[in-house]
Amino acid sequence: MQLPSQSRRTFIKSAAWAGGVAAALTLAPTHPVRAAAGRSVAVFGAGPAGLTAAHELAERGFAVTVYETLADFGGKTRSIYTPDGLPGEHGFRSFFGFYHNLPDTMRRTPFPGNANGTLDNLVRLNAEMIVGTNRKNLTIPLPFPLPFSQLPLTPQAFIDSVAAVFETLFRLPLHEAIFAAERLAVYVSSCGERKLGQWERMTWADFAKLDNSSPEYGRFLGDGFIRSLVATKSANCSAHSIGLVGEEYVWSVLNLNNNNDGRGNDRVLNGPTTEAWITPWIDYLRSIGVTFHAGQRLSGFQLDGSHIVSATVTDAGGGRHEVQADHYISAIPLDKIPDVLSEEMVAADPSLDSIRRLQAAWMVGLQFFLTERVDLVNGHTSFVDAPWSMTSINEAQFWRRPLSTYGDGAVRDVCSVIISEWDALGTFTRKTAKQCTPEEIAAEAWAQIKAGVNDDGVTQLTDDMLHSWFLDPALTGAGTPDVAYDDPIFIQNPGSWYDRPDAHTAIDNLFLAGDWIKTQMNVACMEAANEGGRLAANAVLHASGVPGSPAKIFPRYTMPLWEPLKLIDRELYKAGQPNMFDVIDRRYPIR
């Protein structure tokens, strides 16, 4: 099959990049701020974590300057437009109902005509579709039509109710539905010490016993439905990380911990991320005094003992510039941190060395632009049997602005896909994604998607609908031995919690922000990034001695009736005994 050629990304490497990107792309605040002594902050990285830290500090009177490597802002969340003006992206955005920190920031970000700022640009999803080449497609309504008459507040009611969901909606055999519910009950009733001491040290695949289960069980409790909640793989992610999000989602389905905005337990933006969220956010931050410098990569810090005296940024032309501030926040991606960790910094704070042990994985965005609107489902689609572990969403149904107003006017929809598995052989090319050229990646992904959604006897996608495709430009060297991906996502491999740093460091004016530092949310997502930005802002507030209220960190929901069980489990854990509901797992010692 011959696919249309890829739309190539415009990198904005124009005259500004050739010589003077700092001057050309610096955005001055509309109301310059004169910093009081001790109140200047340099933030490196303009993703959600860095922007959140800037937001919280600027609203508290700090003079904040943000430095970003790229020519645009938003990090992994930003829209990436093709040369002909079509809206691509690193990957689609999901805003779950159990997010609280991020919606608070969005509510405080003005948007014309919206009473609740950019938060009002979220649209609720009504369904999730699970498709595969070897099974009948399944559409699950959101929220779930719960098959029980009372809330599952007690452990037995919880197990019975969750098992009923797994059996009726996910079509698991009864014994496996009960088993899966019991495993979730084990996690929910575990004390914090066990979660970090036992479940953090094993994979979700081992915790959920995926190796000894049916294919159907593995599809849903492994890398099928779970992948739509957590951007990771069950085989290399800690049971604590996936269990936490699984618990949050259960309470969300029951509407016990959702952000109280009436938008359900899964939402998406009503337009390209940059238009619906990031640009309004940047505009607001500029209006309260934040200055932005694009095309400025953090290169290192200069220390005097355990105090930073300056930082260095490098522009696209190789020019190096000194940055001086009272406080420094590094909100650059995890995979870029080792490049700026000098031996002098590690000597000042030995715990920083453990950051090098944290891992990241490829999750690459691919958009198929269509000449017809195709509403596969009013929500996300998970391709549980696809060897490249893909998820997608057709976005025109949610966007306020028609796709026909972009590009040449021929596009009516965009199927935005995330490819998560890069080391498995494709069905049609018999190559791994890492071995394929961009054209082969697009052809194989398109073929896998068609094989899934056209498998119910109804043809929903055809080749003549395909206008063009767009592969995340952070993927370079595709089809060569030098293939690389410059925008990987943090994965919570077993034991990684103990290598993750706090927002504050032993260097008295250096702070860290991101979804990979220690946060309540624990997993790589926008909510954790926002929380990480708030933690960094609060650490700056504390270090500066400036009076005032810290940024609020919204607590995770806890079910009151389960708290006594956690107290019992704490004593069991101290005694080296398993959780009261864990009758099968004796292989992993309690530490």
Image (cartoon, rainbow, N blue to C red):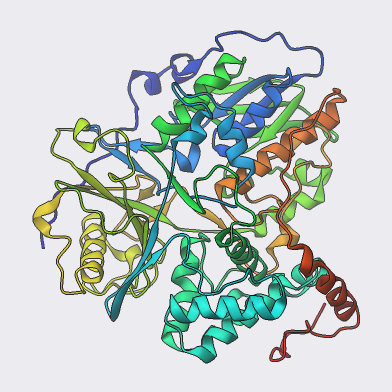
The quadrant of the picture occupied by the N terminus is bottom left
Say which residue appears at 85% left-offset and 30% top-offset: 543
Residue 241 visible in the current orientation: yes
Q: Residue at x 70, y 25 (%)?
A: 57
Q: Is residue 298 visible?
A: no
Which image quadrant is residue 246 in?
A: bottom right
Q: Relative to residue 106, is residue 438 drawn left or right?
A: left
Q: Position of residue 568 (x, y in %)?
A: 87, 76
Q: Position of residue 94 (x, y in %)?
A: 47, 50
Figure quadrant of the C terminus: bottom right
Name which residue lies at 50% across and 16% down: 27
Q: Nearer the viewer, residue 49 or 95?
A: 95
Please state the total of marks drawn on the protein image: 0
Q: Can you name the residue that lies furthest to the front here?
A: 149
Above or below, 548 against 299 in this view is above
Residue in the foreground of this view, choosing between 381 and 439? 381
Observer-nearest of 102 and 443: 102
Instruction: State left or right for residue 351 relative to residue 97.
Output: right
- In the shown orientation, is residue 382 left or right of residue 551? left
Q: Residue at point 59% right, 68% down?
A: 237
Q: Which corner quadrant of the image does residue 130 belong to? A: bottom left
Q: Looking at the picture, how far across and down is residue 291, in whole percent? A: 58, 18
- In the rendered structure, the answer to whether residue 131 lies left or right of residue 361 reads left
Point out residue 375 in the picture as x, y percentages from the top left corner. Answer: 25, 54
